Structures are given as structure tokens and as C-alpha cells.
Image (cartoon, rainbow, N blue to C red):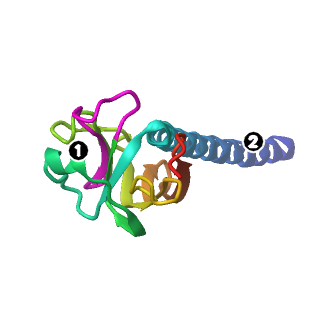
């Protein structure tokens, strides 16, 4: 009887520990999935920005007129840029710009100058702050164009909410100095 009681107590503690490990594993996998989604979105943006030209940064998430996007470059040296438009690799000067912005809590991309938008982050990822810092966008200004992207947000995962802060710096591949 004593041996059965001791065995029952040991099994109860063991099952409790096993259930805790399963919950911790589920949380870790959910966090990994969220970060993989965010990293994929950021990598896609970085790759496009790296080979793009004529960067145009705006402090409003609403894109300016397509004509303004096509004819001007604009820095956001002090940050606060909420929208980044640029000429994608291989595009002509009259082709639509590729545009990235934060809309609500989702990162979005437009390949037609801001007419249609597609979310590039998963719905469970909530972006609280997204800023662009653009330096050297004016052609011939003796500064190699550079874009710094800063993202702060959170995601719901089993067992609560996890927060994250990610920053990426991208330098234009073409020499502009």
C-alpha cells in the first residue's frame, strides 16, 4: 500500500512536469513561428530595398500622388518615416514604385505605387511601431543611400503575449557617391 502511494505521488509529479514541458514547447514553437514570419518579411523588404533606387520616405502612411513618388527622392534622417517608396530593380522611371507601410498593426507592400496593398506579416503579429530612417536618397549628394528599418510589436502565443524589437540596416547596392 505504501509503495503504491509513493508510486502514485511520483507519477503525479512526473505527469505535471511533462505537461509543463509540453506547454513550454508549444510556446517556444509559436514564438519561433512568429519570428520566422517577421524575419521573412524583413528579409524580403531588405532584398528589394538593397537593389532599388530613388528612395522616397514619408511621415504619413498614406502615399503621396504617384507623380510625386516618381519625380522626387526624400530623406527621413531623423526617423519617423511610416512609408517608403522606391524604384524597384529593373524598372523604368515611369513604372510604378514599390511601397512599404504600416497600416494599423500590419506591414503592407504595394507593387503598383500604392493602389493595391498586400499584408506581408501574419495576422497574429501586431506591429506597434514601424519607422524608416532614410539617408542619402538625393542622387549625387556624396552619401551612399541607406535605409534603417525599426520594428516594435507583439504577438499572441500560448501562455500570453511576447514582445519583440527588430532593426535592419540596408545600403543601396549601386554606388551613388
- Chief secondary structure of the magenta span? loop
In the image, what residue occupies the spot 42% across and 51% down? Answer: 156
Reading the image, the residue beneath label 1 is 70
The answer to whether 157 appears left or right of 105 in the picture is right
Whether residue 69 appears in magenta in the rendering, the answer is no
Where residue 35 appears, as percent x and y from the top left, is 53, 44
In this figure, what is the number of numbered marks?
2
Where residue 131 appears, as percent x and y from the top left, is 39, 61
Where residue 25 appears, as percent x and y from the top left, is 63, 41
Circles 2 and 1: CB atoms closer than 8 Å: no
Furthest-bottom residue in this view: 78
Furthest-top residue in this view: 90
Furthest-right residue in this view: 3
Reading the image, the residue beneath label 2 is 11
In the image, what residue occupies the spot 80% across and 40% down? Answer: 4
User: Viewer-proximal residue, 82 or 14?
Assistant: 82
Q: Is residue 18 above or below residue 167?
A: above
> Which secondary structure, mark 2?
helix
User: Viewer-proximal residue, 71 or 49?
Assistant: 71
In the image, what residue occupies the spot 21% across and 39% down? Answer: 113
Q: Quadrant of the N terminus?
A: top right
- Determine crowd level at label 2: few under 14, some 14-19, many 20+ residues with C-alpha closer than 10 A: few
Q: Which residues are magenta?
A: 87-105
Which tag, 2 or 1, sits closer to the chain's start?
2
Whether residue 96 appears in magenta in the rendering, the answer is yes
Amino acid at each position: 500500500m505504501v509503495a503504491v502511494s509513493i508510486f502514485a505521488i511520483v507519477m503525479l509529479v512526473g505527469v505535471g512536469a511533462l505537461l509543463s514541458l509540453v506547454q513550454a514547447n508549444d510556446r517556444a514553437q509559436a514564438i519561433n513561428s512568429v519570428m520566422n514570419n517577421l524575419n521573412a518579411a524583413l528579409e524580403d523588404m531588405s532584398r528589394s530595398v538593397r537593389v532599388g533606387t530613388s528612395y522616397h520616405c514619408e511621415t504619413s502612411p498614406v502615399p503621396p500622388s504617384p507623380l510625386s513618388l516618381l519625380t522626387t527622392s526624400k530623406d527621413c534622417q531623423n526617423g519617423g518615416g511610416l512609408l517608403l517608396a522606391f524604384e524597384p530593380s529593373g524598372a523604368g522611371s515611369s513604372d510604378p514604385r514599390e511601397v512599404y507601410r504600416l497600416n494599423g498593426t500590419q506591414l503592407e507592400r504595394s507593387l503598383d505605387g500604392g493602389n493595391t496593398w498586400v499584408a506581408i506579416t501574419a495576422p497574429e503579429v501586431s506591429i506597434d511601431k514601424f519607422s524608416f530612417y532614410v539617408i542619402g536618397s538625393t542622387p549625387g549628394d556624396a552619401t551612399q543611400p541607406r535605409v534603417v528599418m525599426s520594428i516594435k510589436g507583439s504577438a499572441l502565443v500560448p501562455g500570453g503575449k511576447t514582445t519583440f524589437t527588430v532593426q535592419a540596416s540596408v545600403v543601396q547596392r549601386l554606388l551613388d557617391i
